Structures are given as structure tokens and as C-alpha cells.
Image (cartoon, rainbow, N blue to C red):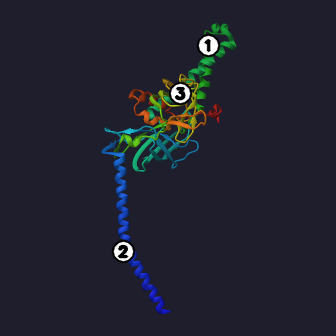
Amino acid sequence: MRNKLISLLILLSFAFVNLSCFAEPVLRGGVQQNEEVRKDLENELFTGKIEHLERSDVIHMTVSQVLDSNINIEGDEFFAEVVNDVKGGTGVIIPKGTYAHGRISKTTEAKRLGRPATISLDFDYLITPDGREIPIEGKMSTELHPVASVAKIAAQDVGYTVAGGAVGGFLALNWLGIEAAIASHGYTLAGGAAVGGAVGLATALMRKGNDVLIAPGDEIKVKINTNVPLPVYKDSALLQHELFYPGLDIAITNIKHEEDPFGEANTITLTVTITNRSDKTISGLDSALVNDYNAVFRPSVFGDTKLMFKQIAPGDKVIGNISFAVDNINRKFWLTFYDRRNRKALTKISIDNAYRKVSDKVKKKNDRVRTRKTNFKKDRDLFEDFS
């Protein structure tokens, strides 16, 4: 028994030695292979040039979840998504679709005298679509500069007081009549205005400021406080996948972001050139915008409808506009035309790909439409001012 045990130990030791001899070349080969894959990927994605994300640069983002001054607390984590390509001198260094990790660094409650709630956000790293993690230091806050904040509150309170005085004078005039006003040399009106002013002042003192709510789709501006060297992407590395149908050529030549009749920035209007050399007849009613979550948005009757009801038969060439109302204007979208028989997608044309060729003038207008909401005011019941 003892001899068998010794033999087994010797056999295991030889096996371990043999395995250890082969382990290093296999590991070395694996590391070398991974390094080659990494270099191939870098050559495919990047130009080889380096640009810097500069201190004081501003990145436009939209949050992935609701941030509410009534609910969230300091330390809560969240993610935001970059909504515009960030460019250096020679190309894109942070592509649209990059995710940013953030934490809530400070919250304050709404207070009397119309002082609003605030939320301050800190960002510590980015995750690019190609999987790189980039450390940054970024900040965003809804808090106004103290001077601007006081001026804004003072203007609002004067409005309340003046309005109260006007209402008080109007009521005195109605209750006591013009004769009483004349007989008292206007003192009834002055008294009514004084009472109204007191009521207005009391309202101003009691009035609470607004709570803050930042929702997905709301665009925030994040200021960068670090200087980060980054590789420049090739144009071909950032192209979104598309689907084409033989003979059906669709080109998006302009993209406008617009407000609907209710003032919401949720409409995308496309200028489209369609050359139909295929065996299909299509129309605007066969189209939709499909986002990266596969949500489908049909043409909007509140936007440009010129192309919506147009029939485009084989041999036709059409240029026109078509509008779509979407839930979040900052998402990735594809203009999709469906086969009207089986409802399967014939073509999928990337809005992001087309947006690169849009003029800088149009892009600036789109930015202004998307970022008009700057105070992130949360609507609430009017009776809450006195609770």
C-alpha cells in the first residue's frame, strides 16, 4: 500500500511538471493574441491622433432615470448619456451614445420666499461605445448664482405685490363705486390697493419655490474640470448599421428638431429624397422612426405632412419633408420604410449617420430647441404653496 501511494505521488508530480512546462507558452500566446486583437481594434476605430478633452469643456447629456429633489438624496448613483459628438480639432473624441456615471452631490429643498429646490451632480467616468472607461471630473447644478437667484426671487415677489395691489384697487372700485372714490379723493382706491398689496406681500412670503425634476429627455450641460488626452475616432468607426432594399435609394438631406403645438421639443422633421427604382410602391404612411429600444413612432399630423400621403411608385423621384413626434428627441433613430404587404422593414436609414452632413447652422438651431428647459421646474398643486 505504501509503495502504491509513493508511486501515485511521483506520477502526480511528473504530471504537474509537464503541465507547468506548457502553461507559460499558452499564457504567453494568449496575451500576445489579445494584444494583436486590441491593436487591430484600435487601428479600425482610431486615426492615431490624440486630442484633449479640455478643462471647462461642456458635454451635453440626458439622464437615464428621473432625478427628483423630493425623492433623491445625496450619494444616489445614476447614468447619463452623451447626446452630441464631442469634437477635438481633428475629429470626434467622445461619440454620441457614450455613458457617464454620476452621483448626486447635493440637494436642497424648496423654501419660502420662492426659493427653489436644487440638485447638484458630479460625474467621475465615461464608458464609450467601444468599452473604454475614461476618468473625468464633471459637474452640473440647477443652483443659480446667488446674485441672479436673489434678483429672480425679488422680481417674482414684486410681481406678486403689484398684482395684489392692482386687484385690491379693482375690488374697492367695484364694491364702493366710483362716487366713493371721487368723494374720498381716491383714498378708497388707495386703501384697497394697500390691502391688496398686503395680501400680495403675504402671498409672496408664504410662496414656496419649485421642486426640481430632471427627466430622461431633458438635456443637461456638464462642465468638465479635468484635462484628458483621448484618441480621435475615424468617421467610419461611428457609423450606425443600416438596411437597404435594392433599387430604393433614400437620402436624408436635412434634420430639424422642433416643438409641437404644446411647446414640447419632441418633433423631428426630415427632408428626404427618394429615388424609387425598385419593384415596390411606398408612401409616407409606410414609414416610421424606430429608436435603439425598438420603439416605433409614426408620422405626426402636427408637423410637415407633405410626404405623409405621397404615393411613390417605381420610377418616381420625390423630395419632401416628413415629421415624427417622439418620446425622447436625443435617442438614436432610424427612418424605416415597411413593405405594406407583410409589414417587414424594407430599409432602415440612420438619422445619426445623416446628421453628420447637416449644416452647423441647423445643428445650432437644434441645440437651442432641445436645451430651452434650464430650470427643470417640477409642476405641482397650487395649494402646496400654503401647506
Is the residue marked by circle 1 packed among few (<14), some (14-19), or many (20+) residues within 10 Å?
Answer: some
Is the residue marked by circle 3 packed among few (<14), some (14-19), or many (20+) residues within 10 Å?
Answer: many
Sequence order check, earlier mark of 3 and 1: 1
Which callout, 2 or 1, points to the residue nearer the camera? 2
**Label 2: which secondary element:** helix
Residue 269 visible (yes or no): yes
From the viewer's perspective, tell me whether residue 217 is left or right of residue 362. Answer: right
Residue 313 place in picture, x, y as percent: 53, 26
Residue 39 place in picture, x, y as percent: 34, 53
Residue 227 visible (yes or no): no
Residue 242 place in picture, x, y as percent: 47, 39
Q: Is residue 50 above or below residue 327?
A: below
- Looking at the image, which is closer to me, 69 or 42? 42
Which callout, 3 or 2, points to the residue nearer the camera? 2
The residue labelled by disc 3 is: 323
The residue sitting at 63% across, 15% down in the picture is: 170
- Looking at the image, which is closer to me, 275 or 84? 275
